[in-house]
Image (cartoon, rainbow, N blue to C red):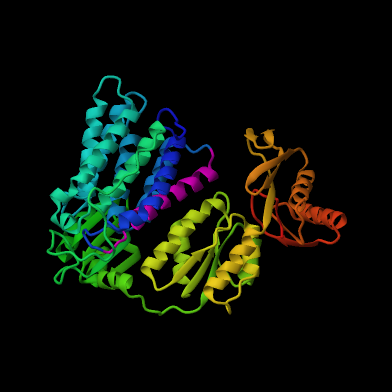
Amino acid sequence: MEPVTHGITLDGVARFVDIATDALSSAREEIDALNVYPVPDGDTGTNMFLTVSAARDELRAARAADPALGLGEGMAVLARAALLGARGNSGVILSQMFRAYVRHLAGAALQDQPAQTIAAAMAEATDASYAAVGTPVEGTILTVSRAASDAARVAAQQPGARTRDVFTAAAVAARAALAKTPEQLPVLAQAGVVDAGGRGLCVVLDAVETASTGRRPMPWTPPIGTHHIPVVTHGAAPGQDLTEDGPAYEVMYLLDADDTAVHELRQTLAGLGDSLVVVGGDGLWNVHVHVDDVGAAIEAGITAGRPHRIRVTHFAEQVAAVRHRGSTRTGRRVVAVAAGPGLAELFESAGAVVVAGGPGQRPSTGQLLEAVTACGAAEVVVLPNDADTVRAAEIAARTAEAELDVTVEVIPTQAQVQGLAAISVHEPGRTFDADVREMTATARHVRHGAVTIAARQAITMAGPCEPGDALGVIAGDFAVVGSDLEEVARDVLERLLAGGGELVTIVSGEGGVELADRVAAHVEERHPTVDVSVHEGGQPRYPLLVSVE
């Protein structure tokens, strides 16, 4: 069971996005394996995950920057981030659904008739998604969305209807509609699958149901199976692109343009190809189309406004890359997440490609994927150095392997000091597997802790704390509560050293340089046989990070 917040609140919205991101992460490979329409390139699950995770990350960052952020502002951040982070056909459509849903709620009196308002917002999201698609096709994510919003409106009309009843009805109807998609789209029946985009939308609606009711739906099993990418299909459905005479390229870009220019842009792009989706508004648009003439598609954007973040995918190469991977990349690199400028310098001095991270600004899957892609290496080791970043790193790794000729391994480091220990034994001269094993073993043997200041009243493993109390963290759990930061730091280190150790590493954060020196002197006095290494990390929130090896 999940905790439930009654009514629509920003906490509830944030929990929904967290649940949806985790659920899409878990279902990503399954959804990718359902992907045969409009192009059997096996990336629908990945694209929908990246779209929602981008929204999740921006919402987290906005709330960290402004703890008093309101529901309306938070949902606006969510919608804009989904638009900016949307990838692929289904990801772009999903971002439009978010946007329409948020716009409706922003103009409604949510507290008066919440169930009816939510249902109307879902209907508007469905209408907007149909309007955004150049040639709507049934048996796709659009059909599943229509079934969900229709069921939501019926549920909202029942006496005493609550928002949770609306969300549950929508999720149930979506699952039923998904099972029928092969009856509507022959290419799905031929491949023996349901629609991938529709399945992704079901995952999102299941997350809404879980956030509103606390119940997790029963595990879903494909009614007619999945396939291995790439699938061989026979015959072509309307709009299916991967045929001898179908468009060869997927073109996506963000577009700064007046709303009045978009109608002509849609007409121009519709004449160039298919799978056209244009979403957005208020001067910012996300454009997706499948074409043969890439230049013409981009020129249409230039005529309408200013295209940027242009992304072009050659379908034949993408599908062939799944079968045969060449070796244009060389060497081995480490990608490390650093929580402060000093930590970034430490990782860079060890040869790592650094991605900025840390509490309040954890990197998205897209940022990690970009780092892996840009480093140009054939073998990449990723050090997330944060428990909440491990899953995003794993998705980035699998996505990179699916799209590039690269081997990626994630060492699940949950603390910055674990990452420092791992990279200290990195040796490119070893075989890749041996290097990963050595780095992993070293990271696992590090006992780590930290000290911080309580920001609010809470109950911890060590008892209650009040704002301003000193907190000691051991292996990710609050284990010490005190009034003096230095005393708490000493206590944390003594507990870590209770099991023995040869090296203590202390990394000072913002305002913690002098504290680090005093704690280091304490260790040298009490444990003269233990070596002590002190570094300036510059990380926020944690004056000290410590480890024992």
Q: Quadrant of residue 153?
A: top left
Name the one closer to the observer, 59 or 441: 441
Name the one closer to the observer, 276 or 487: 487
Q: Residue at x 70, y 37 (%)?
A: 468
Taking the magenta stretch, the answer to whether it contains residue 69 is: no
* Extreme-top residue of the structure: 159
Q: Is residue 452 left or right of residue 394?
A: right
Q: Residue at x 25, y 33 (%)?
A: 152
Q: For the image shown, how many numbered marks are present on the structure?
A: 0
Q: Position of residue 443 (x, y in %)?
A: 62, 61
Residues rendered magenta in the picture: 41-67
Q: Quadrant of the C terminus?
A: bottom right
Residue 377 in view of the camera: yes
Q: Quadrant of the N terminus?
A: top left
Q: Position of residue 154 (x, y in %)?
A: 22, 29
SS majority, magenta = helix
Q: Quadrant of residue 536?
A: bottom right
Q: Is residue 492 left or right of residue 123?
A: right
Taking the magenta stretch, the answer to whether it contains residue 57 is: yes
